[in-house]
Amino acid sequence: MRSKVCSSLAALLLWTAVSAAQFRGFQAASVLPPPPLRLEAGSEIEVPLVVRIRPGYHMNSNQPREEYLIPTTLSWEAPGLELVRVDYPEAEIVRYDFSEEPLSVYSGEITITTVFRVPAKVPALGEVRGSLRYQACNDKACLAPTSADFQTAVLR
């Protein structure tokens, strides 16, 4: 009897450890790499970034309605390019049972568009990198804020 209890306990501990490890790697959203950038001197280029949010989850918009909520933000490492603006999609205003106030969120698939200005002297870049920081939630709880890093090639 004692060996059955020990075996069951060992199996439960192993299952808990495996589940916790899988949960740590869980991403409620995925970022599709943007298309390669073609830089032309003196031009502006638009870079669309497609974000897919898992069914049953949402992420706070870039302008959440409550100060304590973590906004979705997009940052870039693109030396030599001038960041003109980042255009976030229109958010959904949704009421959840856990909040007295409606929230400003994204769900499903969204596109965030960045506009860069290319200087007269085109920088010698092989790639640019970016990071999307967000906090995802379902209707019961929020996950810890996280970032999804990505990169794309620069064509000449």
Image: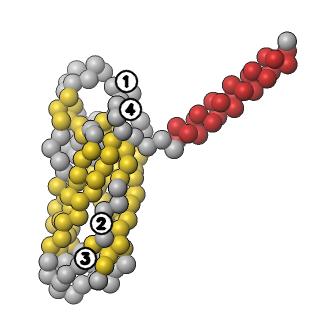
The reply to whether residue 98 is in sight is yes
Would you say 31 lies left or right of 82 here?
right
Q: Earlier in the sequence, mark 3 or mark 1?
A: 3
Structural crowding at the residue carrying mark 2, measured as other residues with C-alpha within 10 Å and reported as few (<14), some (14–19) or many (≥20): few
**Residue that sits furthest to the bottom in the current view:** 121
In the rendered image, the quadrant that contains the N terminus is top right
Disc 2 is placed on an element classified as loop
Q: Which x, y percent locates residue 15? A: 65, 30
Mark 4, residue position: 142
Q: Amino acid at mark 3?
A: Arg
Contact, mark 4 vs mark 2 (Cβ under 8 Å):
no
Q: Amino acid at mark 2?
A: Pro
Disc 3 is placed on an element classified as strand
The numbered mark at residue 35 is 2
The mark lying in front, picked from 4 and 3, is: 3
Residue 12's image quarter? top right
Disc 4 is placed on an element classified as loop
Mark 1, residue position: 140
The mark lying in front, picked from 1 and 2, is: 2
Q: Which x, y percent locates residue 84? A: 16, 66
Gap in angstroms between the C-alphas marked 4 and 1? 7 Å
